[in-house]
Image (cartoon, rainbow, N blue to C red):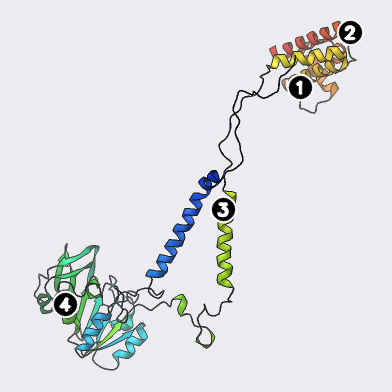
């Protein structure tokens, strides 16, 4: 039997070498992703003012979330505004005389030093009031910030009218006045304390630079704060930006970097992009190719048998038959793969009831002298295997 292994010339051939189009098709996603990341980075750098984050309700912050506009209005009225970012500084300012304490920091809720200060106090957006405002309870859920009518007799609120307010919702102690209702509580509560008046507002959004000019926001803020001669404005402590970290002789951290660092970072980014394009390439579509010939297993066995017969390799054929039989019957006899000759013969003789010498000669004896002996050996081995399988 001859096998024709020549390729079929009628079928088409396909090139697996990458082309310019296939390379671009495979790497365009990485290129577009790199361009988008570069654009986003440039946009962030351009829209970030000086790399500094905005500070909410800070009288020195000019961003939309800050309150510098309100501080300027208060100073224009002759009110002294002192910005502090620690409890120690607030206590020290209180020792200077009659001052209003404005608290926009939330981390001071449980500090008893502030609770012991006498005078008026305005607490903004702080739901934790156990020490600062005893008797006031914060209701669960809060409220959405929107324009609200005062609906109360408090002069500061009625004169201001509609205000953009919300946030925490309070219920006040006996004798308190609640304004700007939300649900079952109020977003502004005012009541007298031992040394002045305590006022709480659910959020300070109406005091920010962005909202101060809307509705009656400025009027309410000035009515609550403008009657004081001096204000101690306690804010969240400022977190320095990376560019503000001072080094020796006033130089920033960027000034202390070696001049080759930016160049090295840029070259590293380009190298990573090139490696991604190189390793991410495709070699083209998978080509399905049929085998030239299909040879059945029976034909393979017959072909090998003809080769043995032509070369008169009876010993080789007998060894193949015996090895196959031993491999198949050994597990059925309960023996391991390393079982010796005597163990296999003894177990097989017990299982089949045949003479151990006859079984040993069939499995381990000399090679047959002629073709008839080889055929007889094959039949005997087949009969032994059938007997073992049946029992």
Using the numbered discs, state the Cα–Cα distance from disc 3 to disc 1 in whole angstroms.
Answer: 52 Å
Residue 284 at x, y = what percent? Answer: 57, 39
Residue 369 at x, y = what percent? Answer: 91, 9
Q: Earlier in the sequence, mark 3 or mark 4?
A: 4
Q: Nearer the viewer, residue 121 or 375?
A: 375
Q: Quadrant of residue 341?
A: top right
Q: In the rendered image, is residue 319 in sight?
A: yes
Confirm or deny contact between disc 2 and disc 1 (CB under 8 A): no
Residue 43 at x, y = what percent? Answer: 40, 65
Dot 1, crowdedness within 10 Å: few (<14), some or many (≥20)? few
Q: In the rendered image, is residue 133 in sight?
A: no
In what element is the residue under mark 3?
helix
Q: Earlier in the sequence, mark 3 or mark 1?
A: 3
Q: Which residue is mark 4?
A: 220
**For the N terminus, which image quadrant?**
top right
Q: Which mark is residue 276?
A: 3
Q: Earlier in the sequence, mark 1 or mark 4?
A: 4
What residue lies at 82% left-to-right and 22% top-to-bottom? Answer: 343
Would you say 210 lies left or right of 149 here? right
Q: Which residue is mark 1?
A: 327
Q: Earlier in the sequence, mark 3 or mark 2?
A: 3
Using the numbered discs, state the Cα–Cα distance from disc 3 to disc 4 in whole angstroms.
Answer: 59 Å
Kindly report which numbered mark, 2 or 1, lies closer to the viewer in this rendering: 2
Q: Which residue is mark 2?
A: 370
Q: Nearer the viewer, residue 110 or 205?
A: 205
Using the numbered discs, state the Cα–Cα distance from disc 2 to disc 1 in whole angstroms.
Answer: 25 Å
Using the numbered discs, state the Cα–Cα distance from disc 1 to disc 4 in whole angstroms.
Answer: 97 Å
Q: Earlier in the sequence, mark 4 or mark 2?
A: 4
Q: Which mark is residue 37?
A: none
What residue lies at 10% left-to-right and 79% top-to-bottom? Answer: 155
Kindly report which numbered mark, 1 or 4, lies closer to the viewer in this rendering: 4
């Amino acid at each position: 039997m001859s096998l024709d292994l020549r390729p079929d010339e009628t079928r088409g051939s396909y090139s697996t070498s990458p082309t310019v189009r296939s390379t671009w098709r495979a790497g365009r996603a990485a290129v577009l992703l790199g361009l988008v990341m570069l654009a986003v980075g440039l946009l962030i750098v351009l829209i970030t003012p000086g790399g500094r984050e905005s500070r909410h309700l800070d009288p020195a912050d000019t961003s939309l979330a800050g309150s510098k506009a309100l501080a300027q209005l208060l100073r224009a009225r002759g009110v002294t505004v002192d910005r502090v970012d620690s409890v120690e500084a607030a206590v020290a300012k209180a020792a200077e005389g009659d001052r209003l304490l404005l608290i926009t920091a939330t981390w001071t809720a449980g500090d008893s030093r502030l609770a012991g200060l006498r005078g008026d106090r305005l607490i903004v957006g702080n739901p934790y009031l156990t020490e600062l405002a005893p008797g006031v309870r914060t209701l669960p859920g809060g409220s959405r910030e929107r324009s609200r009518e005062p609906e109360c007799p408090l002069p500061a609120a009625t004169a201001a009218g509609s205000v953009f307010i919300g946030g925490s919702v309070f219920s006040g102690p006996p004798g308190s006045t609640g304004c700007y209702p939300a649900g079952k509580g109020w977003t502004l509560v005012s009541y007298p304390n031992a040394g002045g008046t305590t006022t709480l507002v659910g959020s300070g959004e109406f005091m920010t630079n962005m909202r101060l000019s809307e509705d009656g926001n400025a009027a309410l803020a000035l009515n609550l704060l403008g009657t004081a001669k001096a204000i101690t404005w306690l804010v969240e402590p400022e977190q320095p930006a990376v560019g503000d970290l001072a080094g020796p002789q006033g130089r920033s951290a960027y000034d202390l970097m070696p001049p080759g660092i930016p160049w090295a970072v840029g070259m590293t980014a380009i190298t990573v992009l090139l490696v991604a394009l190189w390793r991410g390439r495709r070699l083209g579509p998978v080509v399905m190719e049929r085998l030239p010939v299909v040879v059945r297993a029976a034909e393979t066995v017959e072909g090998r048998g003809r080769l043995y017969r032509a070369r008169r390799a009876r010993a080789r054929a007998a060894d193949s038959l015996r090895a196959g039989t031993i491999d198949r019957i050994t597990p059925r006899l309960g023996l391991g793969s390393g079982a010796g000759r005597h163990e296999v013969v003894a177990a097989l003789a017990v299982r089949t009831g045949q003479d151990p010498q006859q079984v040993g000669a069939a499995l381990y004896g000399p090679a047959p002298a002629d073709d008839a002996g080889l055929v007889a050996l094959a039949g005997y081995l087949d009969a032994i295997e059938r007997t073992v399988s049946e029992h």
